[in-house]
Amino acid sequence: IPVCSTCNSRFKGSYDTFMNEIIYPYINWKNEGKISFYPKLLKRGYSYEHEDDFSIIVQANNTRGKNSKALFHLHDLYKNHKSIVARIAFLDRITTPKLCNEIASILNDKKIDEQVVMNKFLAFQYAHSPGGILSKLTDDVKHFFKNKRQKR
């Protein structure tokens, strides 16, 4: 969720956050489910791996979330990060139990599973870490694809 000085000064400006509360990102945004991100295919039969085939939905679940979404133009801001969602979709497709078992065997580490492999690829590719840059987006999208995989 945007917390940098650019967003806070350019977008927030003189907006009254006392009367129109927003999400305070350092205090209460992650665990309360106020804002969620998920990809949505624009056409049937296409792939999340092609950026033009999907959009990123920013869902606000309460008043604070809706105020933040509008104030910070979250839909416009996050549509610029479709390449990350496409990478997660690709990793979700290739990160199979068989691949994980092979990696675990090579590294002699039985704790390696699909989530560990995906996190390592993402960390290497985008320097994401838990609580780091775009971690809410990547966490939500990874959860989206995990649920989708479990339904298959």
Image (cartoon, rainbow, N blue to C red):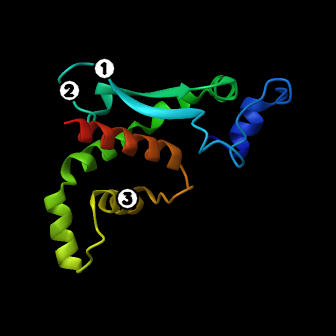
Contact check, label 2 and label 1, Cβ < 8 Å: yes
Residue 91's label in the rendered image is none
Question: Which amino acid type is marked by label 3?
Answer: Asn
Where disc 2 sits, the SS reads loop
Question: Which amino acid type is marked by label 2?
Answer: Tyr
Give the mark nearest the N terminus, 2 or 3. 2
- Foreground of the two, 113 or 85: 113
Q: Which residue is mark 3?
A: 119
- Look at 52% across and 58% down and name the residue there: 130
User: Cα distance, mark 2 to mark 3?
Assistant: 25 Å
Question: Which amino acid type is marked by label 1?
Answer: Leu
Q: Is residue 32 visible?
A: yes
Residue 46's label in the rendered image is 2
In the rendering, at what x and y percent does residue 78 appear?
50, 34
Relative horizontal placement of residue 27, taking residue 53 as reference (left or right):
right
Where disc 1 sits, the SS reads loop
In the rendering, at what x and y percent does residue 89 appear?
29, 42
Relative horizontal placement of residue 29, taking residue 24 as reference (left or right):
left
User: Cα distance, mark 2 to mark 1?
Assistant: 8 Å
Within 10 Å of disc 3 (Cα), the crowding (few <14, some 14-19, many 20+) is: some
User: Cα distance, mark 3 to mark 1?
Assistant: 27 Å
Within 10 Å of disc 2 (Cα), the crowding (few <14, some 14-19, many 20+) is: few
Outermost residue, top side = 43
Residue 42's label in the rendered image is 1
The quadrant where residue 116 appears? bottom left
